[in-house]
């Protein structure tokens, strides 16, 4: 099967169909990718790496990584952290809504909505400005795995909590998955989102206990209803400090804390492991954190190591390689799981093996993913300088930042491009390109090292904006658009002596590229 074939339905009125792969399915595995004459380490493959592990490449990114080996390039991306300045709303504190007049309640709700908007705009800016780092794409992956919604059941998970969760993903997204699972279990946003802050002895809330197993670690079929019930009991007693008129623990506002009176101190049994009863001397935050919460997480990984590894590695594969794995991809996912278990559930070794593999660079996997709205909008900003209401357009395309449709996250895959969302994408690209002034277009042109050679310029432009090499026919159309019927060799003179013509022709070409079906791919 051609992993790009579905886009031909969009192509009948375009100037060319999506470029197709030579191979119908990837036959390679996790053995290291070795560049060759047939598969060089060039702008196309560097661009492929950057499209999958960042929010689309800038030319300077491609140029920098082409000077490294494939292994060095991957190491640079995985080893480089991102530490953005926090947004101004990070510590915005309000009262709770208890006992307030309707006017004051409306005012505070308005503050929460404004904070969420500020967080979204800040996050888009961080993704746009990030350098050669995998941190932002990993944070996006985990936000779709350990989901939290800003608005749920007419209530809000407030912005300061969502920021702290996002920071957790950014800072630890390539680290110890067991530690991440432990930390997200006591994360303030997650506790509020799934009702963990209401979970108490005698009235356990099973939401998080169920999702911890079904969606976050083992997947369906590897636990019992009894395990869910016992997990809920183990998780009783944790609360979140959200508001200035309520209890604030020593760890501070917006942190989680333990409330001993609401913890179930009776004996429990989870996945065959005993959790002894405790008395008042052992029912403390530190002891319960270690002897029940940490033990709960450890038990899952000890009793279901292979199930956890397969479940997480399949999700990594579908996010970073291809959204609908075939049976032929199962061996690669299994090999990823081997690495995951062997490295004590650390994410970085798995990602390094995947991104350095021959399988990842197989022709069938290049340009086979649909850009998410996040990738599309942030990509427009990174590559073409898009400004304006990027969040609003992203939401209209079907991805509401910090507000997925449910705990399962966004369905993705072909749901990203529909008869409703495709026109939004097209309009967004048109808006951005139309708004580019002459100076901006000329700067865009001159970023390419051989911008005065129209054939080299078109080759580089294609590698930047499209995932696969240009066919001879498409390249000819692009060149003709730039030179306007003049001989190819006159392009250098057009740029230097008629910059307005060069800018106008480039804008026309950019509009043409943005209308191509494979502009939607990464």
Image: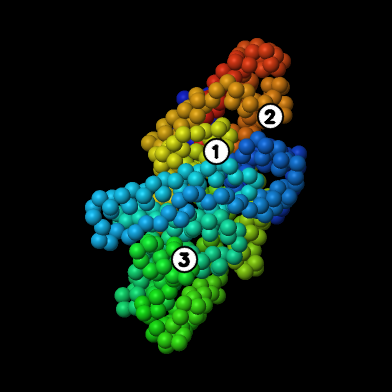
Q: What element does badge 2 sit on? A: loop
Residue placed farthest to the left in the image? 102
Which label sits on residue 252?
A: 3
Which label sits on residue 448?
A: 2
Q: What element does badge 3 sit on? A: loop
Colour mode of the rendering: rainbow
Whole-percent x, y for residue 305 in the image: 56, 70
Q: Nearer the viewer, residue 114 or 301?
A: 114
- Seen at 43% across and 60% down, the residue is 189
Characterize the local packing of mark 1: few (<14), some (14-19) or many (20 or more) Cα atoms within 10 angstroms. Answer: many
Which label sits on residue 379?
A: 1
- Above or below residue 111? Residue 435 is above
Whole-percent x, y for residue 66 in the image: 72, 40
Residue 32 in sight:
yes
Q: Earlier in the sequence, mark 2 or mark 3?
A: 3
Whole-percent x, y for residue 522 in the image: 56, 40
Say whether residue 37 is left or right of residue 125: right
- Above or below residue 137? Residue 333 is below
Foreground tag (2 vs 3): 3
Report the Cα–Cα distance between label 2 and label 3: 50 Å
Q: What element does badge 1 sit on? A: helix
Q: Nearer the viewer, residue 507 or 473?
A: 507
Residue 477 in sight:
no
- Above or below residue 248? Residue 328 is above
* The N terminus, quarter of image: top right
Q: Earlier in the sequence, mark 1 or mark 2?
A: 1
Q: Are marks 1 and 3 in contact (CB under 8 Å)?
A: no
**Tally of numbered tags:** 3
Whole-percent x, y for residue 347 in the image: 60, 61
Report the Cα–Cα distance between label 1 and label 2: 18 Å
């Amino acid at each position: 099967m051609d992993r790009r074939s579905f886009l031909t339905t969009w192509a009948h009125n375009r100037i060319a169909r999506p470029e197709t792969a030579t191979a119908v399915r990837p036959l390679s595995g996790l053995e290291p990718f070795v560049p060759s004459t047939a598969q060089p380490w060039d702008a196309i493959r560097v661009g492929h790496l950057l499209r999958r592990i960042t929010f689309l490449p800038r030319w300077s990114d491609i140029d920098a990584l082409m000077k490294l080996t494939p292994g060095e390039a991957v190491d640079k991306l995985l080893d480089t952290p991102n530490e953005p300045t926090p947004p101004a709303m990070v510590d915005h504190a309000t009262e709770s809504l208890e006992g307030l007049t309707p006017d004051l309640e409306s005012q505070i709700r308005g503050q929460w909505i404004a904070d969420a908007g500020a967080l979204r705009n800040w996050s888009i800016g961080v993704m746009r400005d990030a350098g050669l780092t995998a941190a932002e794409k990993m944070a996006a992956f985990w936000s779709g795995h350990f989901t939290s919604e800003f608005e749920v059941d007419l209530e809000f998970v407030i912005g300061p909590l969502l920021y702290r969760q996002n920071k957790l993903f950014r800072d630890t997204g390539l680290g110890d998955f067991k530690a991440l699972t432990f930390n997200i279990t006591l994360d303030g946003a997650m506790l509020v989102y799934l009702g963990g802050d209401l979970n108490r002895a005698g009235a356990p809330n099973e939401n998080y206990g169920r999702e911890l197993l079904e969606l976050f670690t083992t997947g369906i079929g590897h636990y019992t209803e009894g395990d869910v019930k016992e997990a809920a009991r183990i998780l009783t007693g944790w609360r979140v400090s959200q508001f200035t008129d309520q209890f604030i623990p020593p760890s501070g506002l917006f942190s989680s804390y333990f409330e001993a009176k609401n913890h179930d101190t009776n004996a429990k049994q989870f996945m065959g492991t005993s959790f002894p009863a405790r008395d008042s001397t052992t029912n403390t935050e530190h002891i319960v954190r270690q002897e029940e919460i940490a033990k709960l997480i450890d038990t899952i990984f000890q009793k279901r190591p292979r199930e956890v590894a397969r479940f997480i590695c399949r999700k990594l594969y579908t996010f970073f390689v291809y959204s609908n794995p075939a049976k032929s991809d199962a061996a690669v996912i299994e090999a990823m799981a081997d690495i995951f278990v062997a490295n004590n559930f650390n994410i970085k070794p798995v990602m390094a093996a995947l991104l350095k593999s021959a399988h990842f660079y197989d022709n069938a996997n290049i340009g086979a993913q649909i850009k998410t709205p996040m990738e599309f909008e942030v990509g427009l900003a990174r590559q073409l300088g898009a400004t304006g209401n990027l969040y609003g357009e992203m939401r209209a395309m079907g991805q509401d930042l910090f507000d997925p449709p449910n705990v399962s996250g966004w369905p993705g895959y072909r749901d990203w491009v529909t008869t409703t969302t495709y026109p939004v994408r097209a309009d967004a690209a048109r808006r951005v390109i139309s708004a580019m002034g002459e100076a901006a277009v000329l700067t865009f042109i001159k970023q390419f090292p051989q911008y005065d050679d129209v054939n080299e310029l078109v080759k580089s432009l294609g590698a930047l904006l499209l995932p696969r090499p240009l066919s001879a026919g498409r390249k000819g159309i692009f060149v003709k658009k730039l030179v306007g019927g003049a001989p190819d060799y006159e392009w250098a003179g057009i740029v230097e002596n008629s910059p307005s013509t060069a800018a106008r022709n480039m804008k026309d070409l950019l509009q043409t590229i943005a209308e191509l079906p494979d502009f939607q791919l990464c």
